[in-house]
Amino acid sequence: MERNQNFTKKPFIVDDDDRPTRIESVKFTVPSSKDIRDMAVVEVKRAKFLNGDTCYPNGLSDARMGPTHPSTACETCHMPSRFCPGHFGYIELAAPVYNVGYLSTILDVMKCICKVCFRILLVEDLRISYYDKMVSPHVEPWEKSELFKEIVKKCTTKAVMNCPRCRSVNGLDSIFLS
Ligand SMILES: [Zn+2]
Ligand SMILES: [Zn+2]
């Protein structure tokens, strides 16, 4: 299906019925495995690029993801390379892997969680006060980023040897229990 898309900074888009629609909110999340498969036009399963001028089907430059040469057309949108936006492919991994982009954040979050009761290592008043700021639409993203660093610092200080909720020694009781 060919469709012209108009890019605009205005908060209106045109839907399939050509009626103006107001965007009420935008949500940013990590796509699930299903989302990734649904978005993709091809499963990449061959670690090969080109065989002369032709692309290997299901290879790293499969023509369904976009043209590899200015004179050829995309096999998905049928546009030449200067108009084709490029299309996703996906690789089915043999085993689950950590996303390196999130590794340090995951580690920071885990440091802030009690290894016995799995609650945050903050007293309730402080937890609520941080929570309110973190979900507030009036607090800027950079301020939330600073708040996150502050929370990690508070949870990992030597003063928090015991979980303020279950009193377990942070990081130790779970090892002795297992
Ligand atoms: Zn295309
Ligand atoms: Zn605890």
Image (cartoon, helix red, strand yellow):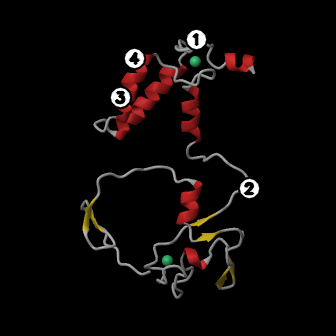
Quadrant assignment for ligand 2: top right
Q: Which of marks 3 and 4 precedes in the sequence?
A: 4
In the rendered image, residue 166, in percent from the top left (x then y), is placed at 57, 14
Along the polypeptide, which appears first: circle 2 or circle 4? Answer: 2
Residue drawn at (55%, 67%) of the image: 88
- The residue wearing badge 4 is 125
Residue picked out by circle 1: 167
Give the quadrant of residue 142.
Answer: top left
Q: Are marks 3 and 1 in contact (CB under 8 Å)?
A: no
Q: Earlier in the sequence, mark 1 or mark 4?
A: 4
Q: Disc 3 residue type?
A: Asp
Provide residue 101's location: percent of width, then percent of height. Answer: 56, 46
- Upstream in sequence: badge 3 or badge 1: 3
Quarter in which the N terminus is drawn: bottom left
Asked if labels 3 and 4 touch by Cβ distance under 8 angstroms, the answer is: no
Instruction: Say if 101 sits above or below 148 in the image.
Output: below
Residue that carries the numbered disc 3 in the rendered image: 132
Label 2: which secondary element: loop
